[in-house]
Amino acid sequence: MSSKEQLSMKFVKTHEDAKLPERAHDSDSGYDLYSVSEVIVPGRGSVVVPVGLTLGYLTPGWWFRVEPRSGLGFKHNLQPHLGIIDNGYRGDLGVKLYNFSNVNITLNKIIKRISNGRKINY
C-alpha cells in the first residue's frame, strides 16, 4: 500500500437488521460485530451467529480477523472461533460462538456485540 493510498473497508448488508461494524470508542482497535437474530448457544456447545453482512471491499494487502470480546468471555463464558476473513472472500459472514458453561445462553438485544474484527496488513 502506498503512502497515498487510504485503507478502506466496506461491508454490504445482506439482512435488513444488519448493523455495520463500528468502534465503541475512537481509541478502540477492534470493530464490534452484531447478531441479526436471537440465537441460543447451547451449554457446552456452539452455534454460528449470523451478522447479516458480506465483505464488500478491503484494501489489497489487508485481511479481517475475528477476535473475542473480553466481556463475553468473562461474564458469559462465550468465545468466538478465531478466524481470518481473506481479502477476496465475499460470502456471508457469521461468527461461530462456543459456550463453555453448562447452561444455554440466549443472545438477545442485551448481548448483541458478539465479537471484534480487526483489519490487519499482511
Image (cartoon, rainbow, N blue to C red):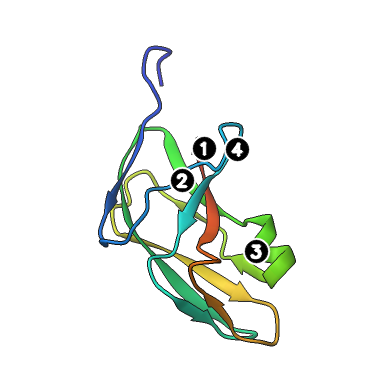
Q: Of circles 4 and 1, which is in front?
A: 4
Q: Which amino acid does label 3 sit on?
A: Leu
Q: In this view, does 79 lie to the left or right of 93?
A: right
Q: Going from the N terminus, do you reach mark 2 or mark 1 first?
A: 2
* Mark closer to the observer (4, 2): 4
Please, what secondary structure does the residue beneath circle 4 have? loop
Taking 92 as reference, is 108 above or below it? below
- Which element is circle 2 on? strand
> Are the two marked residues, 2 and 1, in contact with CB atoms closer than 8 angstroms?
yes
Q: Do the residues labelled 4 and 3 touch (CB within 8 Å)?
A: no
What residue did someone put label 1 on?
A: 120
- Residue 72, disc: 3
Task: Name the residue rendered at 72%, 67% in the picture.
Answer: 75
77 is higher (above) or lower (below) than 22: below
Residue 80's place in the image compared with 7, above or below, is below
Say if mark 3 contacts mark 2, CB within 8 Å.
no
Residue at 54% across, 66% down = 110
3D distance between C-alphas at marks 3 and 2: 20 Å
- If the image is split into quadrants, where does the N terminus sit? top left
Q: Which residue lies furthest to the top in this view?
A: 4
- Tag 2 residue: 64
Secondary structure under the numbered disc 3 in the rendered image: helix
Give the class, few, some or many, for how many residues have Cα within 10 Å of label 1's Cα (few <14, many ≥20). Answer: few
Quote the CA–CA distance across marks 2 and 1: 6 Å
* Contact? badges 4 and 2 (CB < 8 Å): no
Q: Mark 4 points at which residue?
A: 28
Q: Quadrant of residue 37?
A: bottom left
Circle 2 residues within 10 Å: few <14, some 14–19, many ≥20:
some
Q: Where is residue 85 in the image (x, y as percent from the top left)?
A: 43, 51
Find residue 11 and report its horizontal and vertical position in percent. Answer: 32, 46
Q: Tell me which amino acid carries mark 1.
A: Ile
